[in-house]
Amino acid sequence: MSSEEIQPPTIPGNYSARKQNRWKSEDEDSVVSPSSSPPQHRKIAELSKDIDGIHTSITKFHVSPAQLYSTDSGRLFHAGSICICICGEPARGKTNLSISLCRYLRWLGVKSDLFHIGDYRRAKLGDITEDFFSPVPETIEAANLRREITDECIKDMIGFFKDGGQVAIYDAVNALSKERLELASTLNSNDIKVLFIESLVTNPKLLARNILDAAKSPDYANWGAKEAVEDYKKRVELVKPWYEEMNEPLLTYIKFINFGERLIIRNSRNEFLTSKILFFLMNSKIKSGSIYFARCSNNKLKFKADPPLDAKGKDYATKMGKTLLDHIAKTKGEQWYRNTQPQEIGSDLRQPAYGVDGSHENSLIVWTSTRQRTTQAAQMLKDLGIVVRHRSELTQLNPGDAEGLSESELAAKFPDEYEQHQRDPYHHRYPRAESYHDLAVKFEPLLYEIERMSGDILIIADETVIRVFYGYLMASSCDDIPSLEFPQDEIVKITYNAYANKAQRIKIDGVNPN
Amino acid sequence: MPVYQLGHVDNLRICVVMVGLPARGKSLIAQKIVRYLSWLSISTKCFSVGSYRRKESAQPPAQFFDPSNEDGLHIRGQAFEEAITDMLAWFNNSNGTVGILDASNTTRERRERVLKIMRENKIEPMFLESFCENDEMVRSNILDVNATSPDYKGLPSDVAINDMYEKIKYYERSYEPMELSNDSDLTFIKLVNVNSEIIINRIESYMESRIAYYVMNLHIRPRYIWLSRHGESQYNLEGKIGGDADLSERGFKYAQKLPDLVKQYIKDHEKLTVWTSTLKRTKQTAQYLTYPKKSWKALDELDAGSCDGLTYEEIAERFPEDFKARDDNKFEYRYRGGESYRDVIIRLEPIIMELENQENILIITHQAVLRCIYAYFMNVPQEESPWMSIPLHTLIRLEPRAYETLVTRIKADIPAVSTYKEKGTSKLGESSNPSKSMVGEVIATSSSADKK
């Protein structure tokens, strides 16, 4: 491994200089000189598409938004190659779980990718009979097809590891103990560790809801809702008698019960990445709500200034609030927010953290920063009885000494800094400033809170803050995050979806975009 | 019974309630949680019922813990009440966030009582049970407790060991482990046989998940952690900070001597893994070591931004305001375009987590980074840690124990410049204040072992 040899430094300097060197593409020079021109890889044209990047494959040189460090190999934790095998009966939220896990691992900087057996199966559409879905098919054709599809998926995973991938997430039922042992031994012989995550649901209500969700999957694209549910229920019943709950003493596995209510880990080798994944699982819930982002009204204020809203700002706040309420009323019904009144709870019950925020599917919670321009923008909603929380973490990016300077003034005042900033606007900080990366690290706990909530949430914050949250939810790359645009006359809505999050922009009428 | 408006519960206050028989590593885990959360600036305190009990009964024999010993029961009950009272006062008066109740809490009755008191005070209990049936593990914990617990200070070890086994027997009589069947409504973590099985039930807040995550990574087996700064570098000779310079001649000598020091002092050195930063001076220091090596960007020196490559005199001259601002609050001060100590702690957090997870690690890194790692293991307060003196050409051994971390310094006897800068000056030189230097035993090695 190259890290063991002593080599002359390719670039002088320290931590941040080396960080900048990390995502240069392969064909660029290996030496960065401060005078070289900024790279032209900004993809502004693509930004407006609002597409969830979670299914886009990433390159070896990809740097993730919250990546704190990486090793010379571009991998993290020195954990080696790991296949996370998500198993469980149909309708246990496996696809949802695998996608949110992938989103999280990529955000952390682990090179991860998804392998849904369903995608491979759909590619062979036409040959699929109902028999195929049985773990032990009655016909030889179905059995062979199952084997073929599994082999193809495993082959692709092994290829992904050879290309420098670190975590492959394999999403399949894996009903039989025999199948799981075989998978583990195939992968182990390729020097890939396997961690099983078994999703179990013991709560019938959760299961029923999940069946409704699963009936909206790509398998049922052209089906009527009722027929899709009926057909999916059949698939669930087909697997049920065959499914063997995990209990293999030689495998490392996590039982993920009722979507995080309980976790049991067995035969853990005390591996770092395993515990990191557990950490995420402890915080993840099946998401049902949407996240709305609205900007505060005046973006031209000094960082330290904190005046109350002016007339224009109040007008904006009213229109923004009304647009949001109208939108929700249209999609969820007129009376939805009445459910958000605080409840009383006796001391014989467990106290939920952060009040009841987001514990109810039909709730709306508003987060603002502690600046008056955001707290007052939420006043109208607060008066309606909607819970508003002020979070100091949501303060805009601190521009430091770059405050109020135009591009040309920056270039004149801080030529070297300006140069570096052009090269890496995501990680670079001007003197006394914060970088987007600083914000991402600061927001990590808030992301866990969002992952825990099941209702809707509105975040009223500065554009810099919205960019980072959007970047997490839509799996944007750090090249793109600093130039994402959120005009003032739009509310951005991101809806969690099992396969890909959906972003939508809601126009606020009668408001200036800037 | 008080009733809460949930809208008022803005932040959850948590009481971690330890559960388990004696010698299951409870105190070690409790101390570790305090260290970790405090290091991350979260207000945390441990209330050990044992230390309240020791005020009345300093070194009681095992019979004291016999459930039929009324005097013992009375004193232990009182100690429990005192600990709880102090903890509640701390939560209310000092804005506590995480309180830890370090006691055996082996009966369901006791746990229900804690649950009730905490909930009535708007504190959510989180139970943390260490369950162990592995005899070897228990025995090694007994040895550790006997060596460090004030209960056994000054007693011959065989007497202490027998006493401990007897004490455990008394506790076993009434032990009711936490179970999914009975305790499924409670928030709890159960560690079975040193993490070979972990049950995590009803974690409902970020802080709880953070604690659970940390505990899962903990090793409660005895072990050492080895640390060293890189050898003296060219920049050290010139008094410059940062950069990516080569080792000086004396620095190379230290690198040459390091394999002998390792062989001589690290018992399990065959299993050693060496972690370095990505900078030349740490890799060169490790170059004669034949063990597996890993280089981490997170171990790189604090980034001095615009001041990288300058001497302190030059910084004082060119950036006088910065120079003063840094001396005034060295922990929070962030170099222009660079990092603060707080920034370094944030990027080191994954390293600490992995370090807790590993054994036999030698870390060769830089002054500021070592200050942060040392502060974590030694509970050095935030405002003091950036001022610690960590000498060059010294192999440092940390031994985390239940009640404290022991430090041993093995000096290589190769001279080096001092890179220590006292507050208010731009001159380099070791501090005259002994509180700034590391604690622990110093072993001097002779220079005759030098390779030429």
Image (cartoon, coloured by chain):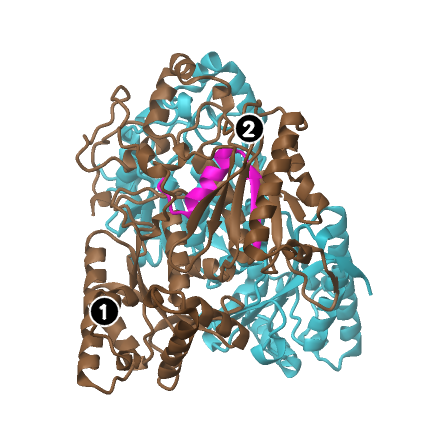
Could you tell me which quadrant the N terminus of chain B lies in? bottom right
Q: Which label was assigned to residue A125?
A: 1
Residue A404 position (above or below residue A62)? above
In the picture as drawn, the residue positioned furthest to the right comes out as B1
Horizontal and vertical percent position of residue A344: 75, 61
The range drawn in magenta is A455-478
Horizontal and vertical percent position of residue A300: 54, 23
Horizontal and vertical percent position of residue B31: 58, 56
Give the colour chain A carries in the figure. Answer: brown
Identify the amino acid type marked 2: Ser
Give B403 or A409, whichever is nearer the viewer. A409
Residue designated by label 2: B432
Give A242 or B172, whichever is nearer the viewer. A242
- Local packing at callout 1 (Cα closer than 10 Å; few below 14, some 14-19, many 20+) is few
Give A508 or A269, whichever is nearer the viewer. A508
What residue appears at the point 26 percent right and 53 percent down from the top-left corner?
A: A165
Could you say whether the residue bearing mark 2 is in a helix, strand or loop? loop
- Local packing at callout 2 (Cα closer than 10 Å; few below 14, some 14-19, many 20+) is few
- Disc number lying in front (1 or 2): 1
